[in-house]
Amino acid sequence: MIGERVYLFDSTLRDGAQTQGVDFSVADKVAIAADLDALGIDYIEGGWPGANPTDDNFFRAPPQLKKAKLTAFGMTRRAGRSTENDPGLKALLDPKTPAVCIVGKTWDFHAHVALGVELDENIAMIGDSIVHADKQTEEVIFDAEHFFDGYKSNPEFALSCITAAYEAGARWIVLCDTNGGTLPHEVSEIVNKITNHIPGAHLGIHCHNDTGNAVANSLAAVTSGACHIQGTLNGLGERCGNANLISLLPTLVLKMGFDTGVSDQALAQLSQISHALDERLNRSPDKGAPYVGERAFSHKGGLHVSAVEKDPKSYEHVPPESVGNKRHVVVSDQSGKSNILAMFRGVGIEVDANDPKVVRLVEIVKEQEYIGYAYDGAEASFELLARRTLGDVPDYYRLKSFRVIDERRWNAKNELVTISEATIKAQVGGKEFMTVAEGNGPVNALDSALREVLLPLYPELEDLRLVDYKVRILTPSDATGAVTRVMIESADGKGTRWATVGVSANIIDASYAALRDSIVYKLYRDGAASVLSN
């Protein structure tokens, strides 16, 4: 396997767009294509010309790619039409992309029921379409739709379909597990048999993830001889998604020694590219995603941390930086001194391991987590706790009191509205302030009131924004009197994100604690000078 070439085909812009809740604009597609090209993907499927206005506009002014071959997607000619007079084939070939991907039926059930054609006509439709396209473009790729189901049902027909495509000039014959129901051992067995008829150097795999095996199935196909893999960024796709190229790529390169054409430098951008897609979709990255998730190289147990400090390979299967990630030591009530010291080193705190303050901090963390704090998901709050224990964090302002009032009423337009109003009394800059602000909720109102006081004195807060807010009931048996834990995720204009936590029987008090830590962390990290007593 070492050094053997595997070609990567990304279908995010078409297959990924079929994900529920995903609706790419032309600008989105251009930006994603640029990221894929920079990564070093061999083929980027741009969409289906003639299928919708977005794809038409994308191909009308396609992005200029440096390495990847832009690929248009379409289907074989229709039954009863010649290739020259088929509008679908014409739309597919009009953009004149370097490669086209043509999908055809390879399951006898679909030929009879979906297309209503005889099996011989289906085979002719495939061969004719490949011959026609091959005259007008550099490369033709044939997607054998529902191939594995077709092969199980009628192996002779399924094999005749892909043989017709190969003999007609298709560069790649891609075996599709379209409904995602095939298992790895079946993929291995079938692909091994197919390599007796079509060389592995012309064979590809396209898997859906309906059994959670899309990545495993893709790897099984490659180890059985296929040299072309189709998938999407972050596994986007209809139903349960497609094979996740973000997981496949580092596995192929770092684990199996294949050459994918992706350089080490490009591979180190993998986490950034994965997260950039999530940002574009306005959703939080999957923290548990292999290789690129925030928890992918997280260590919580004290023994694990001690081991990984001495020998990273003991608990890290690849170096985190090889995929653009980093080691993440979290702190919880399972932590020991090694976790605390590792966290200190991670944020640049130099401290003697025998310092009594370190032992005290371990005790404080366990006490805090006993009453409901969770620092393994709120590292900014932990860093502030640690630095306060060491005496490093200045007071930027002093809150004397706050009050929040919610009013639910009918407005002048006879619309039912709920408005929150926050009043705060704070000391900062040698002065005392009382400020009132409204918001669409109590936390928003509190945030607005604090900003009104702090922004003139701390311009560093200008780009601070709250991006996520979560509440968890810790003592449900106490009903409405339960203790709650509030987690707030914040971000700034540099793209940095951090999480803070607050715990109280009063949800507004817990929210303020997390909000305060978010503000203080931003000021401390940006090196703001305290003006509390100026």
Image (tube, helix red, strand yellow):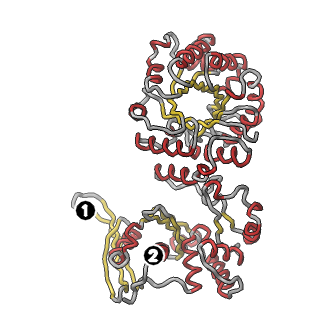
The residue indicated by pointer 2 is 523
Side (left or right) of 380 relative to 355: left
x then y, percent, for residue 520: 47, 77
* Mark 1 burial class by Cα count in 10 Å: few <14, some 14-19, many 20+: few
Question: Would residue 502 be found to the left or right of residue 400 on screen?
Answer: right
Q: Position of residue 504 (x, y in %)?
A: 52, 76
**Residue at the image point whose x is 45% and y is 63% from the top:** 494
Would residue 21 be found to the left or right of residue 428 on screen?
right
Q: For the residues carrying marks 1 and 2, which lies nearer the camera in this image?
A: 2
408 up-or-down from 512: above or below: above
Residue 264 higher or lower than 195, as above or below = below
Quarter of image, res 228: top right
Q: Quadrant of residue 60?
A: top left
Quadrant location, the N terminus: top right
Name the residue that disc number 1 marks.
411
- Residue occupying the point 33% across, 64% down: 418
Q: Quadrant of residue 420?
A: bottom left
Q: Earlier in the sequence, mark 1 or mark 2?
A: 1
Residue visible at 63% across and 60% down in the picture: 295
Q: Amino acid at mark 2?
A: Leu
Dot 1 amino acid type: Asn
Image height check: is 515 above or below 59?
below
